[in-house]
Image: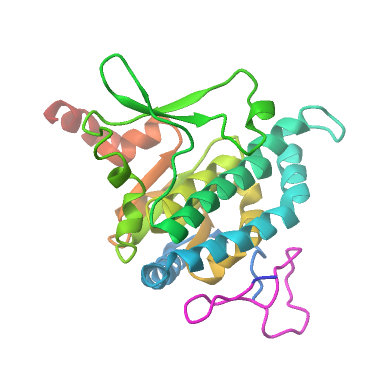
Amino acid sequence: MIRPVPDIVKGASRLPQQATASTGGDSSVKPVGTAVVQADAASLDRCLEKLTDGRDRLSRMNVAQRIALLEQCVDGISSVAPEWVDVVCESKGIARGSRERAQEVLGGPAATLRQIQLFLKTMRQIDRTGAPKLPAKPVRKSDGRIGIRMTPCPGYFDPVTFIGFRATTWLQPNIGEDNLEASLAPAYGSLESTGTSLVLGAGNVSGIPAADMLTKLCVDNRAVLLKMNPVNECVGPIFERAFAPLVENDLLRIISGHAEIGAAAVADDRVDDVHITGSESTHDAIVWGPCRQRSRRTQAS
C-alpha cells in the first residue's frame, strides 16, 4: 500500500503489482509503471515540468515525510524483485536455475534494498537527534587525513556478503575531528534548497541506475529525471512500480530514448546537474561538446 503523508505527499490507493494498461475501473489508481516514456521533445518537457513541481514539494518535506516515502519504496521493491531478476536474466541470456542468477539478485533488488535501508537508518538518526551517527570510529592515515570505515556495516549481512572486503571513505584534508560532525549530511541543514538532477543510467548492473537516482534524491536533495540506456531499459517499467511513491510525488520521472534526448535533457535549463554512468565518449560529449569542437576546447582548458 502507498500510504499518503498528510499535507505534502500525494499517495495512490495501492501499489500496482503488475504493469497493466487498465486501472480495472478504479479511478483513484493511476496506472503507474505501464511503460517507460520513449521520450521526444514534448514528453521530455512534460517530465521536467512535473519534476519542477516535485522539486518544490521536496523543499517542503520534513525528514519524517521523506522516511515515509522510502519505507513505501521498500515495499515496492520487494513486490517486484522476482520480476526484476527474471527480466534482467532474460535480457542477458541467463537460464532459469543458473547460479549466475544470484549475481543479478545481489546486483539488483538486494543491493537497492540495502542502500535504502542504510539511507533510512541515517535519516532516522537525523530525525531523532539532528545528525547522523558514524558507523565506526574514525581512523587516520599517516598524513593525518581522517577516514570512516563503511563496509562491512554493522547490523546487516555485510560480513557474509562481502567476505574479505573492507571499504573506507577518506575525507577531504580540511575535515578534521573538530569539524567532522558539522560536515555530515550537509543537505539536511537546508532541506528547502532543492533542485533537479539528470541521471544518465547506463551499465549492465541493473541496480546502478536505481542507486544513482536514490543518491541524488536522498543525499543531494534533488528530484530526478532518470534516463535509461538501451542496455538496461527493460527494467524501466519495473523501476516505475518499485518507486511508485516517488513517481506519484513528482520526485522521479523515468524516460528512455536515443542520444538526442539525452543531449536535450543535459542542455535544459531546468536541469541543475548531471550524473553519468556510461562511456568515456558520452562524458566527453557532455563536458566538451561535439567532436568537431572537442579538440579546441580541451586544448583551451
Give the colouring mode of the picture.
rainbow
Does residue 194 show up magenta in the picture?
A: no
- In the rendered image, which quarter is residue 141 located in? top left
Q: Residue at x 38, y 57 (%)?
A: 130
Is 182 situated above or below 9? above
Q: Quadrant of the N terminus?
A: bottom right
Does residue 28 show up magenta in the picture?
A: yes
Q: Residue at x 32, y 38 (%)?
A: 285
Number of numbered discs overlaid on the protein picture: 0
- Could you tell me residue 61's position as x and y percent? 42, 70
Return the residue found at the far left.
300
Q: Quadrant of the C terminus?
A: top left
Q: Determine if residue 258 is in view.
A: no
- Could you tell me residue 69's position as x and y percent? 55, 64
Q: Choose between 59 and 146: the one closer to the eye.
A: 146
- In the rendered image, which quarter is residue 146 located in? top left
Is 55 situated above or below 176? below
Q: Residue at x 28, y 46 (%)?
A: 182
The reply, left or right, for residue 164 in relation to residue 199 is right
Is 216 situated above or below 194? above
Residue range (magenta): 3-29
Main structural element of the magenta stretch: helix, strand or loop? loop
Q: Choose between 116 and 238: the one closer to the eye.
A: 116
Q: Residue at x 15, y 26 (%)?
A: 299
- Could you tell me residue 212's position as x and y percent? 48, 45
Return the residue found at the far top.
142
Q: Choose between 175 and 248: the one closer to the eye.
A: 175
The reply, left or right, for residue 150 in relation to residue 273 is right
Q: Determine if residue 249 is in view.
A: yes
Is 285 situated above or below 54? above
- Could you tell me residue 179's position as x and y percent? 25, 40
